[in-house]
Image (cartoon, rainbow, N blue to C red):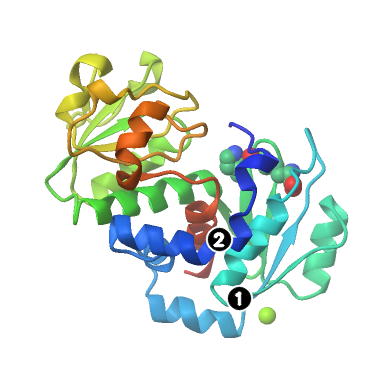
Amino acid sequence: MTRLTQQDLFGLDLELIEYNLSLVAKTNLTLKQIACQAAGLEENLFNKRTEDTLIAVVPITAGEGLINGFTQSVCSIIRYFGFKTFITEETDVSGMAEGVSKGADILFMADDNRFIAFDTRKGNVIDNAVATAFGYAAALNGMANGLAGKEVLVIGIGNVGKPAIEYFKQLKSKIAVYDINSEKIKNLSPDIHIESDLRQNLQNYKYIFEATPQGGILELKHLHSEAAIAAPGVPLGLTPEAYAVFSDKVIHEPLQIGVATMLAMALV
Ligand code: PYL
Ligand code: MG
């Protein structure tokens, strides 16, 4: 998984109101609506749970260690919805113990391999990759004004692309997939179209879900003129030239949709 940098997160906590407005402009959905649709949770229940849910964000020093601003960004996204949230003073196991002893119902924490929400009441684990997949797919559904019966191309069948396929199946979309590694597209269900030549055929797809760790693979000259792109992959899969033209049709940000969807999934 590509590791976020302090620069990726700079200013995120101060710009959530503008960010939400930009999401509504692109998808006709707020961040809360995207998260609740992705999680299958009624918005009013989401709102109600602000009254009885305490959330701890635990800094984890394992592996490459802390990312400056990571726990603060996670905390600010959750607080934006009105949930009581705190960052533990301790890190790692001590931080988990502190969170539980202070009555936290849900613990958010990430090492270099997994970013999870651990629900201490039900004992289940919500994974950021699955939440990001469902949240970005719900955002693309919003941009398309409904993807049922419409073709969507999923590029990158990894830990985000694969769950996204499941979500597009739920939306009854017509799914095409591309991955540079043919191993990744083995034993997918037969109704899924395997795209073999991305450069040649990218222009045939209006709705694109780009979940590769490869930057700059989507070039302006290959994109459908009315393309709408959900790009959870870090770094951004569009070339700067393509992004300059398509920026108001691209969903790409470091944490917001994934964290909001993890929260909603943990409240189901
Ligand atoms: C969850 C992000 C989304 C993309 N890549 C993932 C990433 O950067 N993971 C590493 C997160 C490390 C956090 C660090 C801390 O500050 O607690 N252990
Ligand atoms: Mg409680």
Mark 2 lies on a secondary structure that is: loop
Mark 1 lies on a secondary structure that is: loop
Q: CA distance from mark 1 to mark 2?
A: 18 Å
Residue 15 image label: 2
Q: Nearer the viewer, residue 139 or 45?
A: 139
214 versus 209 height, above or below: above
Is 188 positioned to the left or the right of 31 in the image?
left
Are circles 1 and 2 on residues that touch, CB within 8 Å? no
106 versus 225 height, above or below: below
Q: Which of the 4 image quarters holds residue 239?
A: top left
**Residue to which mark 1 is pinned:** 83
Residue at the limit of the structure toward the left, as seen here = 149
Q: Quick one: label 1, few (<14), some, or many (20+) residues within 10 Å?
A: many
Point out the tag, 1 or 2, that comes first from the N-terminus: 2
User: Which one is in front in this view, the residue at disc 1 or the one at disc 2?
Assistant: 2
Ligand 1 contact, mark 2 (Cβ < 8 Å): no
Residue occupying image coordinates x 72% and y 71%: 104
Is 249 positioned to the left or the right of 156 in the image?
left
Residue 122 seen: no
Residue occupying image coordinates x 21% and y 31%: 192
- x, y percentage for residue 76? 63, 64
- x, y percentage for residue 228? 26, 42
Q: Which of the 4 image quarters holds residue 203?
A: top left
